[in-house]
Each structure stands twice: as structure tokens, then as C-alpha cells.
Amino acid sequence: MARMHLTQALHKGVSQVPQATAVVFGERRRSFAEVTGRVARLAAALRALGLAPGGRAGMLALNCDRYLEFFYAVWWAGGVVNPVNIRWSASEIAYSLDDCDTRILFVDAQFQPLAGELRQRSRSLTTLVYTGEGPAPQGMLGFEDLLAAHAPCEDAQRGGDDLAAVMYTGGTTGLPKGVMLTHANMFTNSLNTLATIARGPDTVCIQTAPMFHIGGVALMLQVLQWLGRQVILPAFDETVLLETIQREKGTETFIVPTMLKRVIEHPRLAEYDVSSLRILFYGAAPIDDALLEQALRKLPTAGFWQVYGMTELSPVVTALPPRCHRPGAGPGGKLRSAGLPLLSVEVRIVDPQGQPVATGAVGEIAVRGPTVMAGYWNKPAETAAVLRDGWMHTGDGGRMDEDGYVYVVDRIKDMVVTGGENVYSAEVENAIAQLPQVSMCAVIGVPDEQWGERVHAVVVLREDAPLTAQALIAHCKTRIAGYKCPRSVEFVDAIPLSAAGKMLKYKLRERYWAGRDRRVA
Amino acid sequence: MARMHLTQALHKGVSQVPQATAVVFGERRRSFAEVTGRVARLAAALRALGLAPGGRAGMLALNCDRYLEFFYAVWWAGGVVNPVNIRWSASEIAYSLDDCDTRILFVDAQFQPLAGELRQRSRSLTTLVYTGEGPAPQGMLGFEDLLAAHAPCEDAQRGGDDLAAVMYTGGTTGLPKGVMLTHANMFTNSLNTLATIARGPDTVCIQTAPMFHIGGVALMLQVLQWLGRQVILPAFDETVLLETIQREKGTETFIVPTMLKRVIEHPRLAEYDVSSLRILFYGAAPIDDALLEQALRKLPTAGFWQVYGMTELSPVVTALPPRCHRPGAGPGGKLRSAGLPLLSVEVRIVDPQGQPVATGAVGEIAVRGPTVMAGYWNKPAETAAVLRDGWMHTGDGGRMDEDGYVYVVDRIKDMVVTGGENVYSAEVENAIAQLPQVSMCAVIGVPDEQWGERVHAVVVLREDAPLTAQALIAHCKTRIAGYKCPRSVEFVDAIPLSAAGKMLKYKLRERYWAGRDRRVA
């Protein structure tokens, strides 16, 4: 049966351009033939270590060339990858390893100090492979030793609906869930993104997004399928990124807006030749107007692509093309949009009963198509809650305009339901943020005897910029409907943020909801 | 399970751009919402007419908007399309209908005169639907009557490995074979071609390739998936094509080189504004240098894309991009190449044992990946002969250069095996064609006591240009290896050609091989 195999990219590389450089990491440059040879050896080692068809192997590491080889070797051997979130604690990591019975874990020098604790905490872990340089520490196998000890094996040729990855997503509540993605899921995402975002014949991707994250994985896959070159950086650093784009003639990279800010505010930006950059992906968060205008001016050759997605969707749902990124593309423009659904991605905006709402109305973003995950590992109830009739219910609130552009307005769980009306916190926050006195604000729903929930604003003011709750509410009434305006306001010194800079609203809500159930749409 | 559905394009159209014009045919212009509404009604009619899930429905017609509606309605109803080759005789058509048990056949006004004979000859046919204008002839149902009589039904949502089409390929020997293509096969070909050949936001395709042919079907599918517009012409006519490009601001079309010649030699070409044309696909045959230079000069906005493929591969295998079409791209250029394998298409060149040959060496072109057909309908032996270990053996001889470009040199069955050596007739023909006296030549293998087969040249000379067999052979010896040179030469007045202008070598061979078996590699 003709199926989509993620390892096909290596076979194509060996067949079409065996000597072309596929992967660059520091001083190491390897061709498609070399990478494939190493992958086939590592796959043989994995089988010898007991990796069964469909068995899981994990990796806990910063980005490196061996991360790419880990992915492809596991697939070549017939296994399933479980890339580990490097920001997690040992107990969270151990939970995710045990949850999907990952027995083999690759660990780099950076995270080697965690190895002992992981071995202690995890029930499933049997084998640790050291991916750092030099000899492997006691109790760990060496990556290069394994390669040296094994002859290449045949590709297991798993594909199609076979599982390729279990990617754990944390979320701010509950235990991490293992998103199950198939070969066809991830392969199709590559085709979708390549069809939407055309690449040239000399593609050089600077990979600085974390490779444990679906964003990094997806970029790695599509560049390899395109038979382009990827230059892998251990982590994001604006100076290293600029140096690398210049040295390697990088044509594309993927960063988040806060990283973009650090790049364009780099004091020596003008000294680097980054004219090779043609595609600049940035994630999820809409870009700030001022930042965008500055970025477009300072990186004039780059086409800006905003991408919106989630792990459960392999991941890209929509993309906003460069033509929508013109400076000053204000009212009527599409700059506030997350863009158009990709080729095989069907998006609709639904009400709580799963029925489509009218064009322009806000509801939950639901997605159908071949990139929808197979489900959450061993969590049938959680799977059934989001996958209904083939539709993935994203939990994101959004709307679609008459041209088919999607706007992400809020997480559904951050929506406030007051007196039977849905209020999207982002809309209220936008209104409040227009006040010059406001430095940051979060809008949450808090329990209310009369309204079920009421709209509550948590506000950080700028220094020496007094503002009363009454004035804030009065301002909102000039901008948004009365029922959307805050009924109570709380001034605080700071709002708790995640490492990625997202507001942790569940922490704000805790105090109000302690001991009560807050239903989430 | 997340699968690829061909009908997804309509759902996306309705969701994203319901009012955008999807299909234009003459005076009729229909939006995505209108086309989808009609498709859902016709699907209901097909079910009422007894089309079972997986059942076949055929169409025998020139191109029209109803042809597109036929395709999508059959899929929407859960069925399988069997588009009929309009060049076939009634007995060939009846054979193909009966072979895959097609019971419902759509017929247009042009082919309505064949309906009676088809009904007589075919055992499977039960229902004829008239797609022409005006009332349906006796014994046929009317297309618009069916639409009017049925309310829209739900999409059957078949997809993935479900069968979508049985496409009959004739070939020059034996009975037609029904190529079975799945939803995933055809959907993936769309993604492949869209990823390789980037489209713009205002795509308008002028559909003049026959819609019964995989080339026309594939173009229809990808333009609809892109949510572009297609303007359907009943058949190729250079004047109509030029008028239509100008009127509809056509951005792309697909024609064969002989049609291209008629376009660029059109006496009033300069009077048409065809500056909207950005993509010009042309099929299979490499383009003639002189024709190309003329075409590039006369159609300066168009990017030329040569595509090579076959029905069994859904169909596109390789594409040669515009950058390889520079005029005068002679030695060292890629103009003689069929281009690079598409994204999910793995190509290798194999020897008769199926083993890869060295880079640059000639062998059989074999293809693996998600666009490989499911097999030939009800022909397990023929299927097993070409599908081995997931590889489709194309029957085309070819080579791949060090940059991964594929060159199609010959049909394998036209290869001559002499004294254990493979000789590709195209190579010998190229050598002979360099003689100014030669107007046309065909090289075939004929039985030989000593060599098994010997290289035999059939040559048409120009008027008043004498040439001896000895001189011809002596010329060849200066160009190609001795064993490749003809051992016998036959001068004739004409070489039999197919309607498409291809030399019918099997006719030349008949005389020599009468009563013998000629094994084909």
C-alpha cells in the first residue's frame, strides 16, 4: 500500500542529491548520504537495545544534529519518538516517560545531571544514551559508540496511520497529555506548509526553535523533505542567529515575536549581512504594529509569515502571508488575523453545540482534515472531549471574516460567561490597554451571585500614572458593549507570567474559584 | 480517523470563500457555495439511482462544468468515478464499463449518438444521464432534472485509502487496464504539485486538457483545493484559448507542445493580452529548442513547467521548473530533462532485477510513495508485474544526473537487447537524426539468430537526399558505441504515427515478430 513515510526524505536525499549538505551543527557538516548512513546505524542500535516496532524512545536535549538523527533513526527502526520538554521538572519528565512507556532516553551534556534522578523516578526507563561530546558518563551508552558498533539496518518503512510521535503538551491545568501524531499527520503538515509557503532551490533553514517542540519538529521535517539544508543552533541567541544567517546564507528561520524584537534591536544589526533571509516565520502571537514596522524596515528581504497552530494539528492551521504584513495595514487590513487555513485544513467556527456560527461571529475554532491527531495517549475521555465527528475542537475562540481569514480572539477557557453572554477576555483587555496609564492587564471571570460569572480586570499601572476603577470602566463603555465591560477592577503590582511570557490566568483565578468548579466551555 | 477527502475542497470553499467564483463555463459562472449545493443534490440523485458506496459511475463527454460536478457528486455520494476516453470506440468503451461494473453513465450532446450502441454492447450499464442542454433524449435522464428533483444529501466523507477513481489506460497492446486511484493518491498529487509549483492568491486556470484524462483531472483537483477559479473549455482551440486567457485573466493552463506550437504561431497572437499567464504546463514530451525559444519570447510572463507522469502515479512524477527553460540552455543545461521528482515522489533507476544502477546510468524509472496507484482493477497479475516492493515500475527507460534531474530516454519495451547489452532506441535515433538527409527514423529490435535481437533502423529520407545504409551506420559509429549502431537499415516512405504524433513502433515490429514472442523487460 502506498503510504506516507517520514523516512522517505532521506531515501530521496540519497537518491537525488547524496553529496549535498543536509545538516550543519557547529563545525560538523553532513551530507544526505552521511546522515542517512548514521541514521541506519543508529536504528540498528535501537533495535539491538530492544526498541520494538511502535516502541517509544525519548530525547532530552538542546538542539543539535544528533537530535535530527535521533528522530529519523527511531522512525527508521520502526519506533515512535517522544521528544521531552526541556523546561519540565524531573517529576514531570518521569510522568511523561512512564505514561507512554518510553524505555530508551537520549540525554545531552546539558541535561545529563538530571539522568540519575530520572532513572530513580521513572518506572519505564531502562536505557540512557549520552549525546554529548566525549566519553559517555557511567551508566550511559555513547551515541557515537552505538553508531560505531552497528552496521546499517533496513528501513522498517512504517508510515501512513502508524504512530510516529507522542508529543506531550503541558497546559496550565492537569497532567501532561501525550498527543499521538501519525506519519501521515506530520507528512501532510509538511506538504501543506510547503504548498502555502513556497521555497526556493537553495533553501538554508536556521533551526533555532526547540526541536522538542512541534514547531521545531515540523520545520525540520519540511526542510528535509524539500531536500534543503538545515543549520541547527543549540538554542536562541540573537547574536549567534545573525552570525549564522550571514555565514550560512540562511534563507529562513522561525522565531517568536519576543525573539524578533531582540534581533531587530541588536546594537550591531546593521553590521550583519542578512540579505539572504527570504522567509521569517513567527509563531502564534499576533505581531505588534510598531515591532512589525521596525522589522520590515530592518529586514527588507524577508517575507513575514505568521503561523497559528497547535500540537494536536501537526501543527499548522493557518498562515498569514507577507502581503498582509505591509506596514500600517490597519483597519481593513488582515494584520490582526492569523491568516488563511492551509491546504488540507478545514476550519470552522462553532458554537458550544458544535454547530457553525455566522460569518464574522465568534465561536470555537474547530479543525478537520488529515493533520488532526490520532488522539491523546491512553486518554480516551480527554480525546473524546476534543475530537468529535472528525473535528478537533481547539479550545481557541476565534472568528472568520468574509475572505476566509481566521482571527484568534481568546482561549475558550479564558472566556467569561456572564448573564448568558460570552465575553472574550482579549477584547476587553484590548480596550483597557488603550489607556495610557495601563502597563498590563488580564481579564478573568470570577464567581458572581447574580451573573454566574462577572468580568473582572486585574491591572498593573505604570508608575506615577493614577487611574480609578470607575475611570477604567467608563473608558471601556466607550469602546465595547456594556455587558463586556469589567464589573470589578483590581490593581496589582505584577501579573504572573509563564517562562514564555504568557499570562497565567489560572493563577489569578485560583483565589476566586478555590473550592468551586469552574466549567470550561 | 483523519483522512484525505477529495470533497474537502468544496467544504473549504464553502467555509472560507463561499461567494468566490469557482467554475466558469461559457456564460455560466458558479460560486463555491453554488457548485457545492449542486454537487450535494446530484449526489442525492446518484444514491437514489442506486449508486452504492464504492460503486462506479462514468462520464463520456467533452469538458464542461457538469464534468466537474459529476466528479465531486460521485465522491460526495461515496462512489468511484470512471471517466471515459472520448477517443475510444463503442466496443472499447463498453469493455471498460463492464470491466469495473459501471452502471450509471453521464453522456453529453456530442456523444449522445453513441448511447444506443453502448446500451446494447454493455452488460453493466443501467442508467444514462444526459448532460447536454435542453430536454433529455428518450431513455436518458436529464442532469438538471435530477438536481431539481433531489434535496442535498450529506457528504459520505469517504477518503484515505478508499477508491476514488478507475482510470482506463489504453496502451498499444492488450486490453485497457483500469488504474485504481485512491482519495489519498489524488489528494497527495495535488499537495505535491502545489508545493512544487507555487500558485498565487488569484489563480485562474484555463482548463483545456481533457477532463477524462488524469492530466485534466489532476489540474481540476489542485485548482479547486487551492480555492482558485477554473474556466473550463470544451476542448483545445488556440483562438478560444487566447480569447479566454485575455477575458478571464487566466494565470495558468496545461497544453501539450503541439498545442503550444499552434498558440504561438497564431497569426493574431500579438493582438491578445495574455500577460496574466504565469504558469504554462506542458506534458511528457521534451520541448523543441526552437519552439521553446519562440514561446519564451512570445509569452514572456509565463513560467514554463514541463511535467512528466503517468496515470498509475496520480500522475506527476517530475517537473522541470522555469529556471531550466532559458533559451539556449544547451549542453550542461537541464532542458532535455523531465525535471526533479516531486515532494513525496521517490524515484530510482533500476536494472532488470530491480536494483539501483549508478548515477547517470540508464535503467527503468521506478517510483515509490503515496501517489502510487492501488493496482489495476481486477488484474492481479498485471498489477504484480509493475508493483514490486512498493515500487511502481513505469516501463520508461531513464537516467538521473548528479543533481537529481531525471531524463526519460525510452519506453523499456522499445529497448533493444542485443548480445546481452541494452540499447535505448532513443539514443540511436538521436544519432541518426543528426544526418541532414534524415527526415524521421525509428529504431527497433528485430529477431537475430546470433544476437537474440539486433538494432534495426527504419528511416524516412528527405526528398532528393540520398543516403546508403553503409553511410548511415558509419555515421553512427562516430557518435555511439559500436554495439548500439544499427546492424540493418530499412528505408521507407513513412512511419505510422498515433493521433498524438507518437511513432507506433509495435506496427513496425509486427512484420518481424509475427508468430514469435518478444519478451519485454
Image (tube, coloured by chain):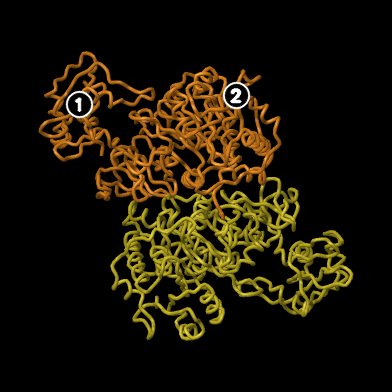
Chain colours: A yellow, B orange
Q: Is residue B60 left or right of residue B317?
A: right
Q: Mark 2 vs mark 1: same chain?
A: yes
User: Is disc 1 surrounded by few (<14), some (14 to 19) or many (20+) residues within 10 Å?
Assistant: many
Q: Residue at x 60, y 29 (%)?
A: B66
Image quadrant holding the N terminus of chain B, namely bottom right
Which residue appears farthest toward the top when viewing the image?
B464
Which residue appears farthest toward the left when viewing the image?
B450
Q: Is residue B4 left or right of residue A229?
A: right
Position of residue B324 measured from the top left corner of the image (x, y, whole percent): 38, 41
Q: Chain of mark 2?
A: B
**Which of the numbered marks, if any, corresponds to residue B457?**
1
Position of residue A403 measured from the top left corner of the image (x, y, whole percent): 68, 45
Q: Is residue A201 left or right of residue B135?
A: left
Q: CA distance from mark 2 to mark 1?
A: 49 Å
Q: Nearer the viewer, mark 2 or mark 1?
A: 2
Image quadrant holding the C terminus of chain B, namely top left
**Which of the numbered marks, if any, corresponds to residue B130?**
2
| Residue type, mark 2 in image | Tyr
Q: Chain of mark 1?
A: B
